[in-house]
Amino acid sequence: MTVTERPGLGLRLLRLLGLPILLILAWWAFSVTSESFYVPTPPRVVQAFAETWFSPRLIDDALPSVARLLAGYALATVLGVGLGVPIGLSVRLRAAAEPVLEFFRAIPPPVLVPLIMLLAGIDNGMKILVIVSGCVWPILLNTVEGVRALDQVLSDTCRMYGVRGRSRLRHLVLRGASPQIMAGLRQALSVGIILMVISEMFASSSGLGFTIVLFQRGFAIPEMWSGILLLGLLGFGLSVIFRWMERRVLSWHWSHRA
Amino acid sequence: MLEVTGLKKVYESTGREAVGDLSFQLDAGELACVVGPSGCGKTTLLRCVAGLLAPTAGTIRVAGVPVTGPPDNMAVVFQEYGRSLFPWMTVQQNVELPLKEKKLPKVRRAELVAESLAAVGLADVPRSYPWQLSGGMQQRVAIARALAYEPEVLLMDEPFAAVDAQTRGELEDLVLRIWQRLGTTTLFITHDIDEAIYLGQRVIVLSSSPTVVLEDVKVDLPPERDQLATRALPRFTELRGHVYAQIQRAKDTR
């Protein structure tokens, strides 16, 4: 009799942590044998991490970064979905807008930083604008695609049963497009983190990107590495939260397709 | 109750004439089936009657009122049950949504939902999601949603084409029972001749495209239908043979 059992806790932990541990060990081996000043050992980085980030710096540098990221991301979501829905619903609007949208999407957002600095200055507004300028495209284009591909039968059903206006938007359009919207939001999240860092590397006086560049210029190498580690952890944490949200929003979708 | 007069539909994009010149009418409380060879414009007919598609010429009236868009007093059960229910809503929410749009008070909505789910034999699964149910059960939900809407005219577009044979028999009897109880004017579109004769008081036989009515067959079988007994009647076999011959002729003259 073969019954697939849930593997034991030990095995699951091994699967989960096996590769990270292996990578850390490899790094360790490399850094111990390497004479390079720029490759500190893991304990040195961990020590620097504790010293650097369990301090007011977390509030002065990391928190503003995250706040700007979330503000820009939220704004891009509102903008992307808000514009994507009408464009997706209207054939004419789509025909007019799509080439332009593809053009804007093709511009790598980091090159906009100098331009946006000129236009919007170097304060928070600029950094948020940079994040929005990059995040909005995947959200917008995926929303357009999702809305365009709404099921015809479901759409007819709504017409037959008098589901129109806001109710149609809520029950049919947004829900029906939500798998694609979520896919756009997921792409936008990684774009957002990149732009958060980049915007802080230009003309900034706080933030994670700024701090990492500062450490690098001051040859505080373990501290610089600890900043990179923190960014990695931040990205990982955000993606875990995102996945949890996605599972809640799209539970019907996964089960539907299973 | 339902009058289709001189209906004609030419698809502009392809120039294909789907429906030629179609006229028939249904009295209040009638159950009529429409059969025709495959690709004969049955779906075009249904979409025009439902007000989902504007005809090129001709008029459709429901209770005397010309159809220009989906009428308020009409409900449709589509063939694609898997796509006509909202997968993100429970069974109950699916049935209730149109009633909310009708602005019915909460108590009345709850009543209608419970009654109609009971009528289709699904009183015990209001909190399930459509994808948790079998195909036949999903189509029952769609039927319950149509019933709860309390339409004067019910359109069914090959509703059982995609369910297995046994479930199909059960669902046919379900439709008959509900129709006998409520007396809703029903237009039932199918490609299955047996089904049309078994269910209908009348069978409207369509030609192939561009579609016209070939014959309007009155089904003079006893009103109480039974899957075994009715289908074993000599008259049933005769009617089936007759309609079958008509449809073959329709195919040949294409």
Image: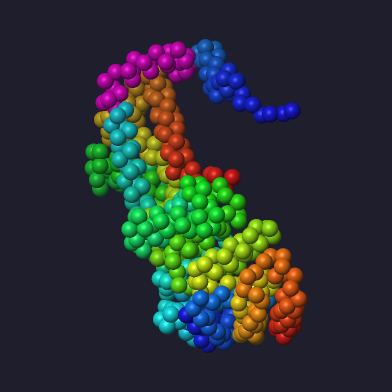
Q: Magenta segment: does it hold A45?
A: yes
Tell me if residue A140 comes above or below residue B14 in the rendering.
above
Nearer to me, A24 or A16: A16
Nearer to me, A146 or A64: A146
Nearer to me, A94 or A13: A13
The secondary structure making up most of the magenta span is helix
Asked if residue B183 lies left or right of residue A80, the reply is right
Give residue B223's position: percent from left, percent from top.
Answer: 62, 73
- The answer to which image quadrant residue A221 occupies is top left
Asked if residue A134 lies left or right of residue B187, the reply is left
Q: Residue at x 33, y 37 (%)?
A: A69
Give residue A244's position: percent from left, percent from top.
Answer: 45, 36
Asked whether the viewer can see residue A102, the reply is no
Instruction: Point out the image quarter for the N terminus of chain A.
Output: top right
- How many numbered dots are placed on residues in this image? 0
Tell me if residue B84 comes above or below residue B51 in the rendering.
above
Q: Magenta segment: does it hold A44?
A: yes
Q: Residue at x 23, y 38 (%)?
A: A123
Query: Which color scheme does this rendered protein use?
Result: rainbow
Instruction: Point out the image quarter for the C terminus of chain A.
Output: top right
Asked if residue A121 lies left or right of residue A103, the reply is left
Tell me if residue B81 comes above or below residue B210 in the rendering.
above
Tell me if residue A14 comes above or below residue A231 in the rendering.
above
Asked whether the viewer can see residue B164, the reply is yes
Give residue B246's position: percent from left, percent from top.
Answer: 71, 82
Magenta region, residue range = A36-61
Give residue A71's position: percent from left, percent from top.
Answer: 30, 40
Q: Residue at x 72, y 29 (%)?
A: A2
Q: Residue at x 58, y 23 (%)?
A: A12
